[in-house]
Image (tube, rainbow, N blue to C red):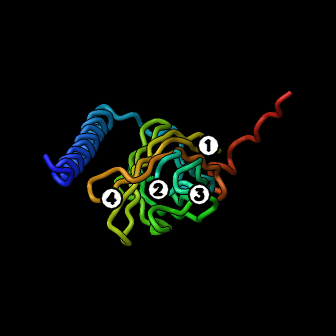
Amino acid sequence: MSFAGRLHVAEAVRCCEAIAAAAMLALTLSGCFQAGGALPPALDITDFWQGVSVVTPGWPGAHGAGIGYGIQLISLTLLEEGSRLTGFYACERYTAECGDRGLHENGPINGGIIAGDEVNFRVTFASDLSSCIFGGRFSIFKGQGSYHCYSGGGLIEAGKWNVRRAGVSPQLQAAPPPKPVP
């Protein structure tokens, strides 16, 4: 088989792997978050959150063409309604572009689900029809987890995210102040 033929086969395999991973994620989410078996949200995370995402080395968005970890400044505006989660995502370059060529600067949060303290949501980017899937956990003051970004059926970026509550919500105002650590 020619080099071009092997390259075409390798691209087809990567595409199939990405589709299989997306299907497994959809099956996992549908089984974990069905109406009868879903945990109710443990807390209200409706608010404005700010933090960072750290691109795993080796992805195109990482600083220095994939040499090291890349950092992006992110914010989440989350709106929780029952177990549904929607809102808006924004990203600003720190040491890494926000997506391929900086095209992932902002987008809506779609199809989000919260069960207990666990969240899963998708951010879509109209600029190139790509999306990122975020999964993680929240407490009253912070959230953290991992993300995977896809475009054209393939994985283009992955990493970790960490945010802190930056807005003031009624729940936060009613919460007792944190106890000092001795």
Closest to the camera, between mark 2 and mark 3, is 2
Going 59% across and 39% down the picture, which residue do you hit? 139
Q: Quadrant of residue 13?
A: top left
Circle 1 crowding by C-alpha within 10 Å: few under 14, some 14–19, many from 20: some
> Distance between the Cα atoms at labels 2 and 3?
13 Å
Reading the chain from its start, which is encountered first: label 1 or label 3? 3
Q: Secondary structure at mark 2?
A: loop
Going 48% across and 63% down the picture, which residue do you hit? 88
Q: Secondary structure at mark 4?
A: strand
Q: Is 145 placed left or right of 12 in the picture?
A: right
Q: Nearer the viewer, residue 162 or 150?
A: 150
Q: Secondary structure at mark 1?
A: loop
State the mark number for residue 151. 4
Report if the CB atoms under discs 3 and 4 are less than 8 Å apart: no
Circle 2 crowding by C-alpha within 10 Å: few under 14, some 14–19, many from 20: many
Closest to the camera, between mark 2 and mark 1, is 2
Q: Quadrant of residue 63?
A: bottom right
Going 46% across and 56% down the picture, which residue do you hit? 60
Q: Secondary structure at mark 3?
A: strand
Reading the chain from its start, which is encountered first: label 3 or label 4? 3
Going 82% across and 30% down the picture, which residue do you hit? 181
Report if the CB atoms under discs 2 and 1 are less than 8 Å apart: no
Circle 4 crowding by C-alpha within 10 Å: few under 14, some 14–19, many from 20: some
> Distance between the Cα atoms at labels 2 and 1?
34 Å
Reading the chain from its start, which is encountered first: label 2 or label 1? 2
> Distance between the Cα atoms at labels 1 and 3?
23 Å
Residue that badge 1 annotates: 140
Residue that badge 3 annotates: 72
Closest to the camera, between mark 4 and mark 2, is 2
Residue that badge 2 annotates: 60
